[in-house]
Each structure stands twice: as C-alpha cells, then as structure tokens.
Image: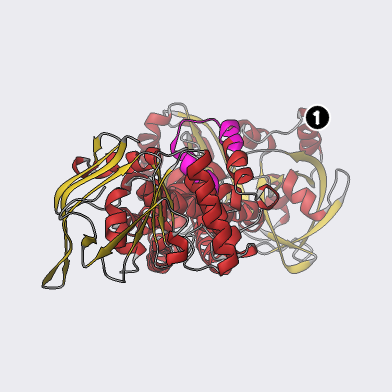
C-alpha cells in the first residue's frame, strides 16, 4: 500500500479566550491508500481535530499535512475548498443532511460543484443511492427517514463524487447497535470493494473492530506508537 | 441554474415565516406601485399636454367670462394659428352627484383646433345642423349607456335656461374617441350658440378661449402678446400653456412627489429592518447547514452568492407580486381619476427597489455566512 495521508510533526493549538490550548503535540502519522483506520481515544484527546486536519477543514499550527501528494496545509481557503470537493467525502455523527432537500438532492450537493451535466449528475446520484440501498427512498426528505437511512444518505453523499478519502466522525454514534453494524458493514464494503481509504473516529471499540487498523489517541498524542510517528 | 433548487429550498425552509415575510413585502410593493403609478400618471398627463395649445382666461378669475369680441383680436395676434371660444357647461345627470364635464363649443372651431379628438365628419355636420346636438366622449357614453339619437336632460351647475329651469336637454349626435389624457373621452361637447343664447346671463361671452399657436417654441411669446392686447382693459386676460395649467392644477393638490416619496420611504425603511431581521435570523438557524456546505467544498464566495441569491429571488418574487397586484388595479385608478398609468416604468422602478432591498437585507447575513469557520460552526461554537 502506498501512502495517501502523511502528517509530519503536526502541532495544533487553539485559543480559548486568553488561554492557548495545544490539542495535538508534534504528531506524525502515515495512512496508506486503501486503509481503513479507526482513531480511538477519550473525549478531548484530539481525535476530531486530527480528522479535521486530514479532511482539510482546519490547518495545523505547525507541521505538514500531505494528502495524495499535495501539501494541503499550504492551500488558500478557496483552493482548499476545491480540494475537499474533489478528494474528501465526509460522514458525520448527526448525518448533517439539508432538511429541506430530498435524499437525492442531498446526495447531488457535491456534484453541483463539478462540471457534470444534469443527466450525468442524476446517473451518479442513482448509482450512489443504489450502493447504499436507498433507491426507493430517493424522494424522501431527511425527516421522513430513520437514523440509519439518513446515515446511508450521508454516505451516498460522501461517495457520490468518487473521493480519494472518506472521513467519518463517529458515524454510528447516534445509531442503535443493529443499524450501526449495517453502517459499519457498508463502510467496510466501500473499503474492500471500492478501495476507499477511510479514516473513522469512534468511541466504540466494537465499531473500531470493523476497521483494518486501530490507533489510539490520548492527550494529543498517538498511544503505543513510536514517539512522534505512527504508521 | 443548477443551484436554484438549493436556493429555493433555503427560501422555504420555514414556510410560515416565509409566507408572512412575503406578504409584508408584497403589501409594501402594492402600496409603492399604487402611489408611484398615481404619481407617474400625473406626470404623464403633464408630459402629454400639447405644446402648441394655450388657454386664455380672465385675469380676475377662471370663472369670470370674457367678451366674445376678444376672439377676433386673439385670432389676429401674430403667431396664432386658430382660436375658439368655450363655455364651461358642467352639469349633473339624473343624480346631483353624477357630474358631467361639459363645454359649449363652436364645432368647426373646436374640433379643428384640437385634432386629437376623433369624430366622424358626418356626425360633426349633424351637430352643426342640430342646435341641441352634442358629441360625447366614448368613455362617458359607455358609462351612462348613451348612444346616438338619445336625448339627455342635463342639469347645469352654472347656467339657468330661459324657461327658468337649470335643465338643458341635449341630443346626442356623435361620439368622439381620443387617447388624449388632458381632454379625455369623458367630456360632452354641445353647441356654443345653444348655451350662449339659451342662458339668462353672460350672453355673448366665453368662459375661456382655446388658442393654437403656429410654432410651439413661440408659445410663451404669443401668450404674452395676447395678454398685452387686453392689458388695462376692463377684461384683462391671463394666457397660459396647457402644460402650465395642468401643472398648476396638480400643484393645487400639493407636492404629490414629496408626499409619495415620504410615504414610500417610511414603508421601505421599516421593511428594511423587518426583512433584514428575518434574513439574519434565517441565516443564524442555518449555520450548521452552511458549515456542511462549506465542508463539501462550497467556497466562501459561493456561500455569499447563495445567501444573496435567496434574498434576491425572494424579494423580487414578493415585490413582483405586489407590483403585479398594483398593475391590476391601474385600470380602476383610471376609472376613478381619469388618467391612465403606464405600468412598465413603475414595474421597472419597483423591481429595482426589490433588488436593492434584497441586497441591503441579504448582504449582512451573506457576509456572515461567508466568514463562517467550518470547525467552529460544526462544533456549535
């Protein structure tokens, strides 16, 4: 497996009022292409911050973040937004679907930023919804869908533009066990069958078992990895 | 266009609030359309006056009659192409409240001088032959259901008949048509001789003279020459252009433009705050959704554009509906006031205001949306 994500000596500090809080300390990490990595750790350990850096939602205070050969920590706001739209699919704990749009319109959102025609967009949306098993619910609004179905729509939205990387923040945190297993099975399928590289943050050890690799984070550092580096 | 469903969905996120806001904007633009339409109608009347038509009244008062002997002198004044006497013959029909705007005229002189009133030559000939003959405007005839051959008993507000009654029967012998806003199709014209010889007082006089000049650019000089003719005589005159008279009449109502501007300004000022507050509230409620859009790759500029588009689409639709409702009422205004309004310029101005309102109220939330930090917004900070 060749490296897809590479973090080098990353430090992330936040200002909270007058206080400066260092959330990640000199963290280095390599994620190979096709990996399914589970990031675990207690609350406040820096899991979501790390995920935000990998997904290009935030920038490190120091250090380098390279994804698919591109130094995303150096990109401007506009170029980073464009980069996200091409390379990353996001899945959130609370689905974060647009409540006023139907399932298919939600899935179409990332494609609006591409130059695809309406017919091509429709075709891609159908394919993504078919993959998550929700073709018959495509006209439903999020409020008409169960939690599991909403998360499937969110996964369809994440994969519809065929991104390199899937970033999932507690994707099963709001679901019952049975539905969580379904969703994790779907992510596993995307990893194995479609070769998607997945980075998933979770509290749940059972959810982490679906990943091919687990890393623990505690107080802003990777636990059980050589100092400053984990692969 | 591909973003339109997203813009549309954003507008109707809270249907109840959207409908109430739409109604308040619609209402404001309905008021704007009506008032602006009224104002533009007044301006149209002034603009459509004939530059070559002058009116000569008594300097003392517009109801003070002038001797008929003035006519020949006016006609001889250099620059005058034609002149004709008119008697104000305003009357009522059946009910004291049913007013009829009427004038006694010399048929050839009047219709020759004022060619924008279209009447068949044959009907004009009948009027000349029929002492009690009258030609009425098409709108007036339609309003009262009059047709050629009808005898109409008019009750004059000014003149008693020789039999001592104010009733003047007239025979309708013709109908005139015109698109003229000053001398609209709402008047009745009967024979000068019939009224002048039939009335008990002021015989051999004219209420005023209508004068047509050869060169509209010389109208002011001709007016001055006419007034000079009768200066220091027992019947001094005051001659003014048709435009001046119309403008004076409008001024008598007050400074319409200022009043309308003040009302519309106050309404839009209030609207600015109410719509602005709604837009800002709507944006605040959607912070997580906007953060998700940014996460998916929507740039800051695109978020600004999306929120502004929502504001523009919403305000233009709401304002457009209000303006359309106002335009639908324009024919009623015409019926009540007598002048027509061209909806085009009012609509364009109104839509311009709607876009302005949208930008002013949409820009602050759009800028806030643009500056949104994804990580903070997703974390609810």
Residue B138 drawn at (x, y percent) = 75, 44
Magenta region, mostly helix, strand or loop?
helix
Which residue is under mark 1? B122
Identify the residue at horizontal 29%, vertical 49% (top origin).
A54
Q: Range of the magenta residues?
A: A107-123
Residue A61 can be seen in this image: yes
Q: Nearer the viewer, residue B230 or A133?
A: A133
Q: Look at the picture and state if B373 lies above or below B106.
A: below
Tell me if residue A109 is in the magenta stretch.
Answer: yes
Taking the image as shown, residue B340 lies to the left or right of residue B261, namely: right
Q: Which colour scheme is used?
A: secondary structure
Residue A160 drawn at (x, y percent) = 51, 41
Residue B56 drawn at (x, y percent) = 48, 46
Q: Which of B188 and A119 is in front in this view?
A: A119
Identify the residue at horizontal 15%, vertical 73% (top origin).
A17
Identify the residue at horizontal 24%, vertical 60% (top origin).
A224
Residue B37 can be seen in this image: no
Tell me if residue B147 is in the magenta stretch.
Answer: no
């Amino acid at each position: 497996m060749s490296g897809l994500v590479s973090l080098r000596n990353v430090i992330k500090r936040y200002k909270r009022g007058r206080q400066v809080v260092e959330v990640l300390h000199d963290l280095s990490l390599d994620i190979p292409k096709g990996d399914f990595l589970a990031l675990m750790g207690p609350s406040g350990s820096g899991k979501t911050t790390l995920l935000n850096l990998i997904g290009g939602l935030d920038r490190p205070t120091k250090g380098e973040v390279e994804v698919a050969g591109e130094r995303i920590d150096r990109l401007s706001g506009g170029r980073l937004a464009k980069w996200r739209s091409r390379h990353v699919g996001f899945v959130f704990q609370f689905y974060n679907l647009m409540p006023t749009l139907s399932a298919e319109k939600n899935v179409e959102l990332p494609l609006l930023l591409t130059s695809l025609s309406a017919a091509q967009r429709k075709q891609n949306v159908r394919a993504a919804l078919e993959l998550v098993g929700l073709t018959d619910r495509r006209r439903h609004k999020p409020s008409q869908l169960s939690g599991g179905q909403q998360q499937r729509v969110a996964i369809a939205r994440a994969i519809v533009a065929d991104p390199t990387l899937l970033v999932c923040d507690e994707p099963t945190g709001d679901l019952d066990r049975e539905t969580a297993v379904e969703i994790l099975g779907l992510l596993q399928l995307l990893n194995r069958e479609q070769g998607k590289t997945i980075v998933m943050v979770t509290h749940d050890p059972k959810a982490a078992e679906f990943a091919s690799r687990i890393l623990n984070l505690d107080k802003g550092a990777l636990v059980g990895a050589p100092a400053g580096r984990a692969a | 266009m591909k973003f339109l469903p997203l813009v549309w969905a954003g507008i109707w996120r809270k249907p109840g609030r959207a409908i109430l806001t739409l109604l308040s904007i619609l209402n404001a633009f309905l008021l704007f359309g009506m008032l602006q339409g009224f104002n533009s109608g007044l301006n149209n009347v002034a603009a459509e006056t004939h530059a070559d038509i002058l009116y000569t009244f008594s300097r003392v008062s517009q109801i003070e009659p002038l001797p008929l002997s003035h006519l020949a002198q006016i006609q001889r004044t250099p620059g005058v192409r034609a002149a004709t006497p008119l008697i104000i013959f305003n009357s009522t029909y059946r009910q004291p409240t049913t007013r009829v705007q009427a004038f006694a005229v010399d048929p050839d002189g009047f219709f020759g001088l004022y060619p924008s009133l279209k009447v068949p030559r044959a009907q004009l000939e009948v009027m000349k032959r029929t002492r009690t003959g009258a030609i009425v405007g098409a709108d007036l005839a339609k309003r009262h259901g009059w047709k050629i051959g009808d005898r109409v008993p008019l009750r004059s507000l000014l003149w008693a008949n020789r039999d001592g009654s104010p009733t003047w029967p007239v025979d309708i012998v013709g109908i005139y048509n015109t698109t003229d806003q000053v001398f609209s199709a709402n008047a009745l014209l009967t024979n000068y001789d019939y009224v002048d010889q039939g009335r008990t007082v002021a015989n051999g006089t004219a209420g005023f003279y209508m004068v047509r000049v050869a060169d509209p650019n010389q109208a002011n000089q001709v007016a001055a020459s006419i007034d000079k003719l009768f200066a220091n005589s027992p019947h001094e005159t005051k001659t003014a252009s048709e435009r001046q008279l119309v403008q004076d009449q409008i001024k008598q109502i007050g400074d319409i433009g200022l009043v309308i501007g003040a009302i519309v300004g106050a309404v839009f000022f209030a609207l600015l705050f109410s719509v602005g507050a709604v837009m800002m509230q709507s944006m605040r409620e959607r912070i997580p959704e906007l953060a998700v859009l940014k996460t998916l790759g929507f740039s800051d500029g695109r978020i600004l554009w999306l929120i502004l588009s929502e504001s523009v689409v919403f305000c233009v639709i709401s304002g457009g509906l209000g303006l359309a409702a106002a335009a639908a009422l324009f024919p009623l205004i015409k019926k009540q006031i007598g002048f027509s309004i061209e909806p085009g310029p009012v609509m364009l101005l109104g839509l311009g205001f709607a876009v302005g309102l949208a930008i002013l109220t949409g820009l602050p939330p759009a800028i806030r949306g643009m500056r949104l930090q994804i990580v903070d917004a997703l974390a609810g900070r």
